[in-house]
Image (cartoon, coloured by chain):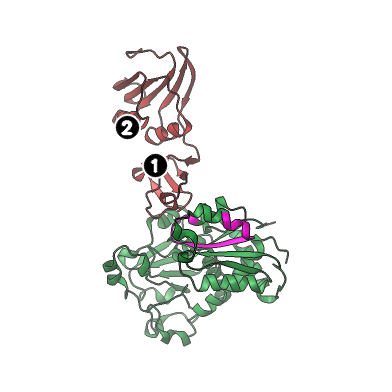
Amino acid sequence: MKTLVHNLENGTVIDHIPPEITFHVWNLLGKQHDVVVVGNHLPSKRMGKKGIIKIANKFLSEAEANKITLLAPHATVSVIKEGKVFHKYKLSLPSLLKGVITCINPNCITRHEQRETAFKVIQENPLKVRCLYCELLIHSQEIVLS
Amino acid sequence: MINFKGKNIISMHDLSKQEIIHILKTAECMEKKKYYDLLKGKILATLFFEPSTRTKLSFHSAMKQLGGSTIGFSDAQTSSTTKGESLHDTIRMVEQYCDAIVMRHPLDGSARLAAEIASVPVINGGDGKNQHPTQTLLDLYTIKKTQGKISKLHVAILGDLKYGRTAHSLATALSLFDCKLSFISPPSLRMPRQICDELTEKNIHFTEHESVEKIIPDIDILYSTRIQRERFPDPREYEMVKNAFILDTPLFKNAKPTLKLLHPLPRVNEITTNMDATPYASYFEQAGNGIPIRKAVLALVLGAKL
C-alpha cells in the first residue's frame, strides 16, 4: 500500500484529496503522457478515506496548484526529484486568484475581452471570491474553473 | 494627507470614508470659488459607449469651467468599436490624446479593465449594472447639503435595485456612514445578494419592502430609481414591473417635513410632475450637484492645487 504500484523518479504526488473529488483533480490536470497512478478510498488517519495521485515527470504550475486548492484545500503536494522528496507543501489559497476561475457573470468584461480573470479571495471557509472586474461575489458552489 | 493625483475612480469599494469626505469638501470649495484656470491646458476624453445626458454634459461643463477642454464620442456607433476594435486597443490609443478619461460602457468591469491599461487616470461614468461612483458622490453631496449630515439617517432606496448601478454604489457608500437602509422593490428587482451579503458582513442594518407607504414616516432620504427597460433580458418582465412605483403627493402626507426625494434621473413615470413643486423634490438640485462633484474629482485626479 505504501509504495502504491509505482515509485516516482521525478514528478508530483498529490495526497490527502477528498475521495469524492480525486477524479476531478485528475481531470483538471489534463491529458498526461507519462505514468499516472490514481488511488482512491485509501485509509487515512486524518481523513478516514483519501485519494492520491502520482504523476511522473510533471510539476505543477502556480495556476494548476491554485485550481487544485479550490477543489481540495487541504491536499498536500510532494515534488519528487531523483527518487527523493525534494519539496513537500500544503496547498494554500493566495489572496488573488489569476486565470483560475471563469466569471459566471455573462456581462463581465472578462467574458468579452481577452483578459486573464482575477478574483480576490474574500473568505476561505466556505470560500467566497469577488471578481476584480465586475465585482460579483461568487460562492464556492458557483465557482467555474477556467 | 490624501493625494488623489493619478488615481482612478472606478468603484465605491475603492474609496475610504476619509477619501469620500475629502472629495465632498473639495466640491464645497468648487462652489465657493471659481477656479477658471485650474486645469488650463488639460484634456479630458469622454468615451460614452452608452447614452448619457447628465454625466456626459456635467463632465464637459466641469472641465470647461476649470479651463480645460474635452474630446470624445457619445455614441459607440461613431467609434472604431463598430469595426471590431477591442476596448483594450481603444484605450491604448485614447490615452495618448488626453490627460484623463471618463468612460461609460455597457459591460460590468470595463472601467477597471480600462484603468489597468491606461497610463492616465480613468473615471468610471457607469459600467454596465456595476458601479457609477461619481453619481454616488453627488448623491452623498446632495444628502449632506439637504440634511446637514450623512451619518445616522434613514435612507430608503426604491425601484430597480437589481439592475440599478446607482442603487448598488449608493448602498455600498452608505455602509460607511452608519445609516439605516431600506430597500423597496418588486420581488423580481430586489437588491442583489452580493450587496446584501456585503452589508450583513459589515453589520449594517437593512430591511427589504415591497411598498413604501408603511415606512415613509420614518424616512429622511427617499432615493427613487428608474425601472431600466434596456437592462431587462425579457421585455415581458419589464412590462410586469414598469408601473410598480409611482410617487405622487398623497403618498407624502405622513412624511417628515425634512424628507428629501432624490432620483439620479432620467425619470419616466416613477415621480409625477406634481412632486416637482413640493419641498421634498431635490432631484434637479441633485443633478446640478454633478458640477461641483465632477470639478472636484477632475481637479483631484489631475493633481491640481486649489
Give the residue type that dot 1 points to.
Pro
Q: How many marks?
A: 2
Which class describes the residues within 10 Å of circle 2: few (<14), some (14-19), or many (20+)?
Answer: few
**Magenta range:** B93-110
Give the residue type that dot 2 points to.
His
Q: Nearer the viewer, residue A11 or B285?
A: A11
Q: Which mark is residue A126?
A: 1
- Asked if residue B94 lies in the magenta stretch, the reply is yes
Describe the element under mark 1 as helix, strand or loop.
Answer: loop
Chain shaded green: B
Q: Which residue is mark 2?
A: A24
Residue B63: name its quadrant: bottom right
Q: Which mark is residue B138?
A: none
Residue B165: name its quadrant: bottom left
The answer for which chain carries disc 2 is A
Q: Left or right? Give the position of B229 relative to B302.
A: left
Q: Tell me whether circle 2 and circle 1 mark residues in contact (CB < 8 Å).
A: no
What x and y, as percent, mark residue A13?
A: 40, 21
Instruction: Please report the residue visible at 46 percent of the width from the left and 30 percent of the height from the top.
Output: A61
What x and y, as percent, mark residue B238?
A: 30, 69
Which class describes the residues within 10 Å of circle 1: few (<14), some (14-19), or many (20+)?
Answer: few
Check the image and report above or below for A93 versus A83.
Answer: below
Instruction: Please report the residue visible at 42 percent of the width from the left and 71 percent of the height from the top.
Output: B225
Q: Nearer the viewer, residue B265 or B256?
A: B265
Q: For chain A, what colour was chosen?
A: red
Viewport quadrant of the C terminus of chain B:
bottom right
For marks 2 and 1, the one nearer the N-term is 2
Q: Nearer the viewer, residue A99 or A86?
A: A99
